[in-house]
Amino acid sequence: MRSTMKLLAAFGGVATLAVVASGCAGGETSSAAAGDCAPVTLEVADSAPDQAWEDNLDGWSQRVSDGTDGRITVRIIPGGQLGGELEMVAQVKQGNLAMTQVGAPGFTEFTPLFTAYLFDDDKVMDFATSYIMQSWKDAILEREGIRVLAVEYAPPRWITSQTPIESPADLSGLKIRVPEIPSLVEAFEALGATPLALPWPDTYYALQTGAADGQENSAAVTDSGKIYEVQDYLAKTDHAQNFRYLLINEDTFQGICEGDREVLEGEIPQLVADQEAQLRAESDELVQGWIDSGALQVTEPDISEFVEMVGDAGSDVAEEAWVPGVLEEIRAEYGPNS
């Protein structure tokens, strides 16, 4: 099937990473010895919702510096100081910034990955290194002039509520805050809930006043938003899972001498592995902390009922963006029923 499948490099898009480079900039691909390599400073803009991404990006930057004898200096600009994710991606594409680390780059290929129940949490990182993902990365590089250096783990999304959720029936009629992502809105409609597409900053107040009955998000975001103060239950539904991406302007990348580029890329697998390990551990610790403190009661429903009820809801985005067969192949190889 893989040999006959063509992947879509469709429609334009904006990306997700921002870095300013100085020193060896431009499109020259040098194979110079280390002694001929010019020093480069890369500024990486980040807006991570969890400290783990910044912590491990810092570790990666130190290893890159050590591996290039200090010729590559990476400076991290945290907290969305350079704007929203799409703004940072646009700056990378324009060459005004070198790199960024974001979760929603706006690329046509990546947007449908928010389709509900597309991935099993134990298999999601296998997809990150799949031939499908590589094809998309190649298409983005050619179209946008942006290289996807890393596809990084992001934890699954769960539901908090005022009443326990053990099955889809428990969602019936509940007003659940969801991000303004059509595929998730459609999925919650299929589950019998009333999705409320509210901006995240409005969520706490909506839950506090009863305008919303629940919300869905990762454990880290649920914790940082202090959602446990206005909710009683958390259901580990694993209904959606995406990635974060480390991006670099291609001209900036090619402006680094060949040996130093190899170091830059060679440290990526360790970055990805460290982030996944830390994020999984943090999610487990948060859940156990909520249980121990009584802040949230946690349920682990049988998600097969949710998968069946969602069905193809929200998959129209994927069907429009990807060539026929890709959605089905991803579900078959990496989904909850694979």
Image (cartoon, grey):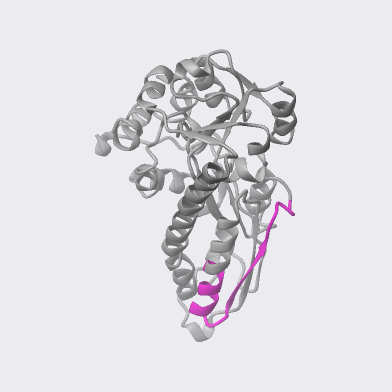
Looking at the rendering, which quadrant does residue 227 occupy? top right
> How many marks are shown on the rendered structure?
0
The residue at the point 56 percent across, 56 percent down is 53
- Quarter holding the C terminus is top left
Residue 113 can be seen, yes or no: yes
Is residue 3 within the magenta segment? Answer: no
- Residue 307 in the image, given as x and y percentages of width and height: 39, 24
The residue at the point 65 percent across, 22 percent down is 196
User: Which residue is outermost to the bottom?
Assistant: 35
The residue at the point 69 percent across, 35 percent down is 200
Looking at the rendering, which quadrant does residue 6 occupy? top left
Front residue of 124 and 139: 124
- Quarter holding the N terminus is top left
Left or right of residue 73: residue 234: left
**What is the span of residues highlighted in magenta in the rendered image?**
60-82
- Residue 82 in the image, given as x and y percentages of width and height: 73, 53
Compared with 9, 92 (above or below) is below
Is residue 61 within the magenta segment? Answer: yes
Compared with 143, 251 (above or below) is below
Compared with 196, 332 (above or below) is below
- Residue 275 in the image, given as x and y percentages of width and height: 48, 57
- Residue 45 in the image, given as x and y percentages of width and height: 66, 57
Front residue of 338 and 82: 338
Left or right of residue 182: residue 323: left
